[in-house]
Image (cartoon, rainbow, N blue to C red):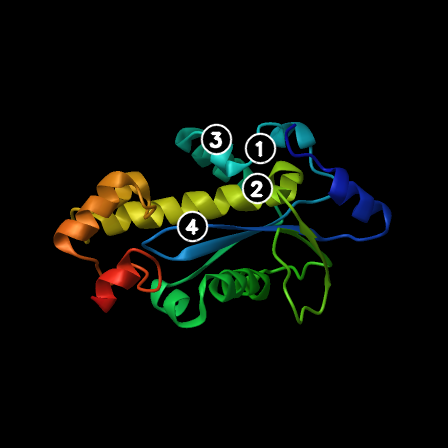
């Protein structure tokens, strides 16, 4: 089943005007930042424009890029924020993921009245929120947030590939593929690698 507006519509019917979808990408990567995306669609949007939106992991790179343009064109808010690897190592990936999400909320030109968050609970918010398991497969707003975060982060990693040679970042985007791991064991890790993640953590401790 593809994501839809069922959750959003329930909130709209309760009088909530601004419903934001919030999701993260890059949480399990060995290199690069973790990114979060936040999307608010207008209630009156022509939903046929968004019919192809799906969990970003189920879409091709070219499809994500074309949908990123659609989302940014028609959304009221399409915000992306990151937390860098050194901060991930300092506060942990869960805290770093929440920090990226909180930055999205702070940077949003419209204050959300209700957040639909993929699987994460944010504490201390001055707004209503719902943590939705596999939310990017259920809510169009969450799926859209995953798409813009994925496109943004992928482009960032492609840009880093020319600076940090040999890791294949333009292909693996920082994930621990076989070739990426081989490069780490052969040439060592770089400053954008997460020192608190295995196997890098064990390499440092040797």
Residue visible at 57% across and 33% down in the picture: 54
Task: Give whichever of 37, 194 is nearer the camera.
Answer: 194
Q: Which residue is mark 2?
A: 144
Q: Which residue is mark 1?
A: 53
Marks 4 and 2, how far apart in space?
Answer: 16 Å
Q: Position of residue 188 (x, y in %)?
A: 17, 57
Residue visible at 42% across and 50% down in the picture: 26
Give the mark, 2 or 1, whose residue is nearer the N terminus. 1
In this image, 174 relative to 43: left or right?
Answer: left
Q: Position of residue 84 (x, y in %)?
A: 38, 63
Give the mark, 2 or 3, whose residue is nearer the N terminus. 3
Residue furthest to the right in view is: 14
Report the mark closest to the observer, 4 or 1.
Answer: 4
**What secondary structure is marked by label 2?**
helix
Q: Which residue is mark 4?
A: 26
Q: Quadrant of residue 144?
A: top right
Residue visible at 55% across and 60% down in the picture: 101
Crowd tier of the residue under label 2, counting other residues whose Cα lies within 10 Å: few below 14, some 14–19, many 20 or above: many
């Amino acid at each position: 089943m593809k994501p839809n507006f069922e959750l959003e519509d329930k909130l709209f019917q309760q009088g909530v005007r601004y419903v934001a979808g919030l999701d993260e990408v890059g949480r399990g990567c060995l290199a690069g930042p973790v990114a979060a995306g936040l999307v608010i669609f207008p209630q009156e949007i022509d939903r046929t424009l968004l019919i192809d939106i799906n969990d970003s992991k189920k879409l091709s790179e070219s499809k994500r890029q074309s949908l990123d343009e659609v989302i940014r064109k028609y959304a009221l808010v399409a915000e992306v924020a990151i937390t860098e690897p050194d901060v991930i190592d300092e506060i942990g990936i869960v805290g770093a993921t929440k920090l990226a999400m909180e930055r999205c909320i702070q940077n949003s030109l419209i204050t959300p009245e209700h957040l639909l968050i993929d699987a994460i609970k944010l504490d201390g918010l001055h707004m209503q929120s719902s943590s939705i398991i596999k939310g990017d497969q259920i809510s169009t707003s969450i799926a859209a947030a995953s798409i813009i975060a994925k496109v943004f982060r992928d482009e960032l990693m492609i840009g880093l590939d020319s600076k940090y040679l040999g890791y294949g970042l333009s292909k693996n985007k920082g994930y621990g593929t076989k070739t990426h791991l081989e490069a780490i064991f052969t040439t060592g890790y770089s400053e954008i690698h997460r020192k608190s993640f295995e196997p890098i953590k064990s390499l440092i401790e040797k």
